[in-house]
Amino acid sequence: MAYVLLLLLTHLLTGVLYQMDSLYDQEVEKVQVAFIEANTDAKIGSSSFQEWLKDGVVLCKLINALNPGSVKSIYEGNMAFKQMENISKFLSSLPSYGIRVEDVFQTSDLFEGVNMASVQRCVENVRRISDLKKKGVKVDAQTPTRKQINLPSGSKKLGEASAPAKKVMLADGPTYSSEKKEDASYGDLAERKAKLASKYDKDLEQELRTWIESKTGETLDADFHTALRDGVVLCKLVNVLKPGSVARINESKMAFKQMENINNFLEVCKGLGVRADDLFQTVSLFEAENMVQVLLTLDNLKRVSNK
């Protein structure tokens, strides 16, 4: 029986990937390669489009050429999770350039090559906006807009929830350091992190902690970031809300596998009805860059799952 289910799952996955591949346009790729090469010092050579962009370096150089200072530091090494961080930095810079949040792909779409059609669509939007700006057309930065949510009677608004009766020893929220280290963020980013930390809602964290524990049966680490960072608990959570939605949860200690868990969680959130502009970026959780946004995503997931 298990073998039959595995064959069926493989068949369905193959069909989905084939459908995605059918949306990929080789002629558009040629135009995009020419556009990127014209705006950076990068050359595609004999690499495929996915191989060329996979480490995020070319994309970061591209957005810095189009909108100087968008990505302050670009990692050019071979560590997978740092390459994925490059991609996330590129994606995070796009709304300020004029790209809509719903036109932004997920990190794993490119890094794992699972949805290059989405990557191509995003790059094409960057190219078109670049052309508009060269012609003198003003393109405004995109600010996420959220529709009013009709909450059940007695529900608290985001940030207004009171702590539940259950007593849990909590950490003081995510910790951010402004100290300059070899692999740490500092300067402007550290200042931004400190501002975000001041907005962190510990009462909401406790409410979400209780909800996650009740759904998964897991006892979370006292530090919320540590509890969620590898993506395992998050995948278990969405598998409870939508059984089988994450077919395989990576229990590995390898960073890129843990980030893959987070990406899988985010994809399921979209399918469950969480808006694209309410989703955090992978590095927002993995590097604790924006735990406020992580709370927002989880709170919205809780709301849509209660409908």
Image: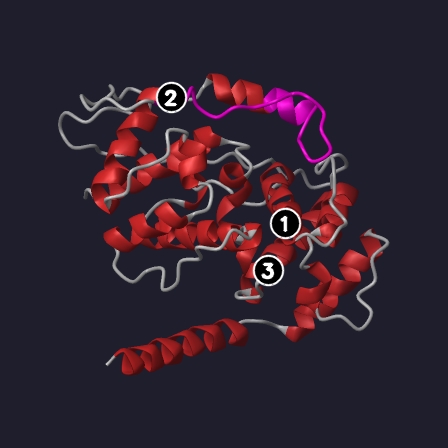
244 vs 279, left or right, is: left
Q: Residue sitting at 43 percent across and 42 percent down?
A: 279
Q: Residue sitting at 77 percent across and 49 percent down?
A: 76
Q: Residue sitting at 38 percent across and 81 percent down?
A: 11
Disc 3 target residue: 110
- Which residues make up the magenta segment? 170-192
Disc 1 target residue: 87
Kind of residue sitting beneath label 2:
Asp
Kind of residue sitting beneath label 3:
Leu
Q: Residue sitting at 63 percent across and 20 percent down?
A: 191
Q: Quadrant of residue 209?
A: top left
Mark 1–mark 2 Cα distance, whole angstroms, equals 28 Å
Decide whether residue 142 is among the magenta residues: no
Q: Are marks 3 and 1 in contact (CB under 8 Å)?
A: yes
Mark 2–mark 3 Cα distance, whole angstroms, equals 33 Å
Q: Is residue 158 visible?
A: no
Quarter of the image with the C terminus in it: top left
| Number of numbered labels in the structure image | 3
Q: Is residue 172 visible?
A: yes
Mark 3–mark 1 Cα distance, whole angstroms, equals 8 Å
